[in-house]
Image (tube, helix red, strand yellow):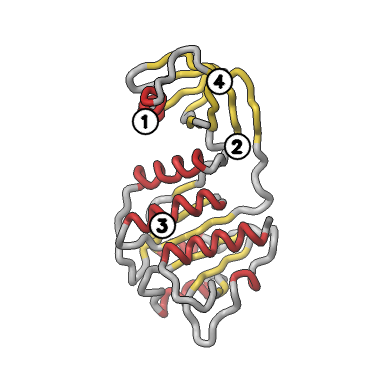
Amino acid sequence: MNIFYAFNIVGELLEFDEEETRHLQVLRYAQGRAIQVIDGKGNWYEAELLEMGKKKAIAKIISLTQQTERKPYRLHLAIAPTKNMERLEWFLEKATEIGVDEITPLVCRHSERTQVRTDRLEKILLSAMKQSLKTFLPQLNPLTPLKTFLPAQMDFDGQKCIAWITDPPAALLQQTYLRGQSVIVVIGPEGDFAPEEIEQAKACNFSPVSLGTSRLRTETAGVVAVHTIELMNS
């Protein structure tokens, strides 16, 4: 099944951007063709193509075939981008397929990467949403310094966890997390967090958690955290 993403909805009309229009053209969709469309906000439409331009296509809504309710909890994963962008992109793809609501790339003291192409990352999220037949597009925030991110979450109404290596080990995420609660999980860079970052996290009421006994790569740790929260709420 081919699914298309509409970036704008005006009345009964769905608008497709240049990339989605190119996708329609490659698949040889023509005017009058019925298509399945999602809007990234929980809605799934059956529509009919009205116009096929070079850079924009327009379809008319025939019916709203599915409206998905948001989960009763929200998962926000904040993660330090990896030096190898392919690994970060892999994480974004898998996290979207499993189920994540919001992602914030972080700049930490030991970060290996301090710049990201947000436009490319958004395309990864969009493709993964369509491939996994989900109807909500995860929110991608700008690259944010950890020292700015932590205090900004002081009023967050949910659990706040930071995954780091402690001796003795902290409690496992699945032992700390309460089912049904909204949660922020913070994942650090390959070199782990600096001591002052951990102290700031504690001061901002983030609880240290463990993701298991294995030493995980950053992107693997992110996937483990997302899967753990999803599994506990299944």
Would residue 175 appear left or right of 216 to someone viewing this image? right
Q: Secondary structure at mark 2?
A: loop
Q: Amino acid at mark 2?
A: Gly
Please give the name of the residue rendered at 61% of the width and 53% of the height, measured from the top-left corner.
74
Location of mark 1 (residue): 19
Q: Which mark is residue 42?
A: 2
Q: CA distance from mark 2 to mark 3?
A: 24 Å
- Vertical side of 48 occupied by 190: above or below: below
Q: Earlier in the sequence, mark 1 or mark 4?
A: 1
Q: Amino acid at mark 3?
A: Pro
In contact (CB < 8 Å): disc 2 and disc 4 = no
Location of mark 4 (residue): 47
Depth check, mark 2 against mark 1: the one in front is 1
In contact (CB < 8 Å): disc 3 and disc 1 = no
Depth check, mark 4 against mark 3: the one in front is 4
Q: CA distance from mark 1 to mark 4?
A: 18 Å
Place of residue 148 in the rendered image (x, y in percent of width and height, measured from the top left): 42, 62
Q: Which mark is residue 105?
A: 3
Q: Secondary structure at mark 1?
A: helix
